[in-house]
Image (tube, rainbow, N blue to C red):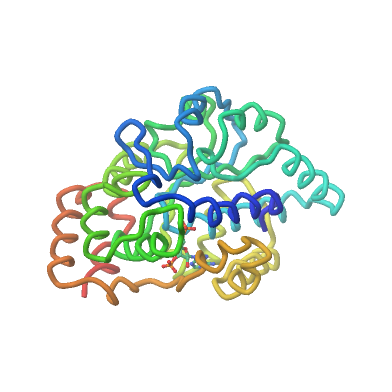
Amino acid sequence: MSMNRKHAIKFLDKIFTDGSKLAPEEKLFSYKDVLYPVILCQPETFQALETFEARMDDIILAGYPKTGNNWLTHILNSLKITAEKYTEEEMKRRIDIEEQLAMTECLEFGDPGKFKRMAKLPSRRTIATHLSPQSLPSSIFKNKAKILVLVRNPKDTVVSYFHFNEKMPCFPASAWDAYFTDFMNGKVSWGSYFDYVKEWDKYIDDENVMAVSYEELKEDLNLGLKKIATFFGFSLNEEEFQRVVELSSFKAMKEIAHKSHGAFGEVLFRKGCVGDWKSLFTESQNQAMDRKFEECLAGTKLGAKIKYEVYCKV
Ligand code: A3P
């Protein structure tokens, strides 16, 4: 239940048309040693990011790519809309404002002027980002906006990212083995998965930060939604929770994918399951990932949240 679909769909559709016009070597740029797709991000937007003024009641979702960001954005918006009991008129008013301001929910997507326009959005704003904490504007931490940190096990994340790269023309496509190596070395868009989790782990005990895993939501969505709602202060009754659960299932979201996400929806809602990594990983890739996880994330709280032993072992 996102509120700014027309502009968002136009933005997403443009990824396909503009992305296919680029040669593979033109598709990514590097900013502070991290790769980003030129169709989605601009160096000028990163420079302007520090001018973004966070609000205490902002709803921030931080997730590495392909860990379920669109799912969680939908969940957060659904919880917000239900708890705040928007009338149809209020919904329309908000949609009109977001359309006029040409907003997409991802903080680092789009033009540098967007941060000024974001100041005109009514509260509470839902803001998603794939950025590590050290790349986020300081006002997010200073103004104590609440941040939901989303994690997914690295094996399913890399498989999901690989298929996404194959289908989305804004990324240079590569064969599985080469893609796996790039992922392990952080040479993919938004950089290293392992650095990302390690950096967010430093914030995990902050009172304004809560972690959730893709896998725990798959196991018990109702329970997960209740934890998220408590964290953000959304009050819903049991029936309302159940309704959000139903509307957030993979099947329900895939059914309306074209309406909610345009052509991007066909690519986004792929399998939506846990354990698909078994379809691609070779034995040596399994061992390499096991070693890397141990080396980078063993002993961290966010690493423990991923439950590597449960979801990543044969
Ligand atoms: P797969 O490629 O493994 O299917 P992101 O939104 O961060 O790009 O993440 C995309 C992943 O989330 C995809 O994983 C997609 O299928 C999955 N996803 C999207 N909606 C979902 C839902 N309602 N339930 C479970 N998984 C979902």
Question: Where residue 297 appears, x then y in whole percent?
Answer: 22, 49
Q: Quadrant of residue 71?
A: bottom right
Question: Where residue 295 appears, x then y in whole percent?
Answer: 15, 50
Question: Where residue 156 appears, x then y in whole percent?
Answer: 34, 65
Direction from residue 299 to residue 126 in the image, left or right:
right
Which quadrant of the rendered structure holds the N terminus?
Answer: bottom right
Q: Quadrant of residue 247?
A: bottom right
Direction from residue 104 to residue 271 in the image, left or right:
left
Identify the residue at horizontal 33%, vertical 65% (top origin). 159
Identify the residue at horizontal 46%, vertical 59% (top origin). 168
- In front of the other: 148 or 23: 23
- In front of the other: 105 or 301: 105
Which quadrant of the rendered structure holds the C terminus?
Answer: bottom left
Say if 62 sits above or below 223 in the image: above
User: Which residue of the protein is positioned furthest toward the right in this rendering?
Assistant: 89
Count of marks placed on residues:
0
Say if 233 sits above or below 55 in the image: below
Say if 227 sits above or below 281 in the image: above
Question: Where residue 206 appears, x then y in whole percent?
Answer: 41, 36
Identify the residue at horizontal 28%, vertical 52% (top origin). 303
